[in-house]
Amino acid sequence: MERRIDNGLLKRFIAGLCTPEEKELVNQYLQQQAGRRHLEELLRDTWDASDEHRISGGSHESWRHELWSRLTGNEEVPSMRESVKRFGRKAFFRYAAIWALLALIGAGVYLLLWAPQDQPLAGIPQIEKANPYGRRSLFDLGDGTRVYLGAGSKIRFPRAFNGSRREVELEGEAFFEVVRDTKKPFIIHTGEIRTEVLGTSFMVKAFDDGEVEVAVATGKVRVDRYANGKRVQQLGVLTAGQQVIYQDALRSAETSEIPVANLMQWKAGKMVFSGTPFGDMLEEIGRNYNLKFVLEKKQLKHIPITLTLDSHAPFDELLNSLSIYIGFSYEIQGNQIIIK
């Protein structure tokens, strides 16, 4: 079995909540090296957050025996030396991850596995602003922070920032001019990525393509990746004229320079492309004009394009200019543009 099961199924298995079919699936999964590695990763992430949760010693012991029985089918929990004699060296390594789990129970990992995670904005009434394709918007948050929200984007935020942090959730792209407050950091959540500032201006782009971009116009910004409520990777500490691009599939981040003028032009309603692949450029134009492009001329997809377009320009004029500049023909079918 090559498919990686999700954390939820693995946790239900440990908790004894699986169906017989699910139990058999996980049993097979844990016989593989990839499955045992997955369990170890889950334990490692949980261990990082274990200081706040404890469980009584008596509960530890009874639960340890129950868990061992569930995972191995044996009632008694043997020592490592006994298990080598009883099950053989091969089985010893098979159960190594299980011993790691049992050892971590003393730190309260059992509770942590099913404890509610620190969800951003949980329990706080939210306002949501969403732009359809073809429209941008400008508005202020309760603290005076100004948001330039891009087309096809949405943001959630509380009516007032009453806690110790100012937190918002973003899907899509937006430029922020954050009012400075040293006692209340401003945090933007985009999936696993958190961007934290005190007072600055910067842009965040996080659509559903697995890539997050953060670029700074003024001040300083810190960008981190979180997992299970715990910071696991610092992606960068950025100052004016710097950007970081994070690729989720590779778990990698690259920092580079970016002209601040590009950010200011986007804020002013421009579409700015700097070495942008032609296919990506079409996606952004499509969001701004609520159109869909079909790229039949595949050789154009990765050609880097550097230019600035007015997002308010009549689309037919823009498309005609692009066709001459880049060299393609096109056909319009309703709201679909076929590039040939």
Image (cartoon, rainbow, N blue to C red):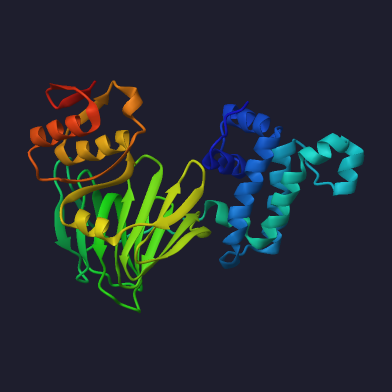
Of the pair 121 and 230, the residue shown nearer to us: 230
Residue 217 in which image quadrant: bottom left
Q: Is residue 182 above or below residue 11?
A: below
Q: Please provide percent x and percent y for residue 324.
A: 17, 30
Q: Name the one closer to the observer, 142 or 195.
A: 195
Q: Where 49 sits versus 327, above or below? A: below
Identified at 18% across, 29% down, the residue is: 323
Residue furthest right in the image: 85
**Which of 80/287 is in front?**
287
Question: Where is the C terminus found, in terms of image quarters?
Answer: top left
The quarter of the image holding the N terminus is top right
Residue 45 visible at all: yes
Residue 193, x across and y down, in percent: 42, 54
Q: Is residue 110 visible?
A: no
Which residue corresponds to the image point at 33% horizontal and 62% vertical from the top-left? 216
Q: Position of residue 145 (x, y in %)?
A: 22, 68
**Image check: 19 left or right of 304?**
right
Residue occupying image coordinates x 35% and y 41%:
208
Q: Residue at x 73, y 51 (%)?
A: 100
- Image coordinates of residue 79 in percent, x first then y, are 85, 49
- Report the front residue among 227 and 113: 227
Q: Quadrant of residue 298?
A: top left
Asked whether, in this view, residue 296 is left or right of residue 238, the answer is left
Q: Is residue 152 above or below residue 50?
A: above
Number of marks drawn: 0
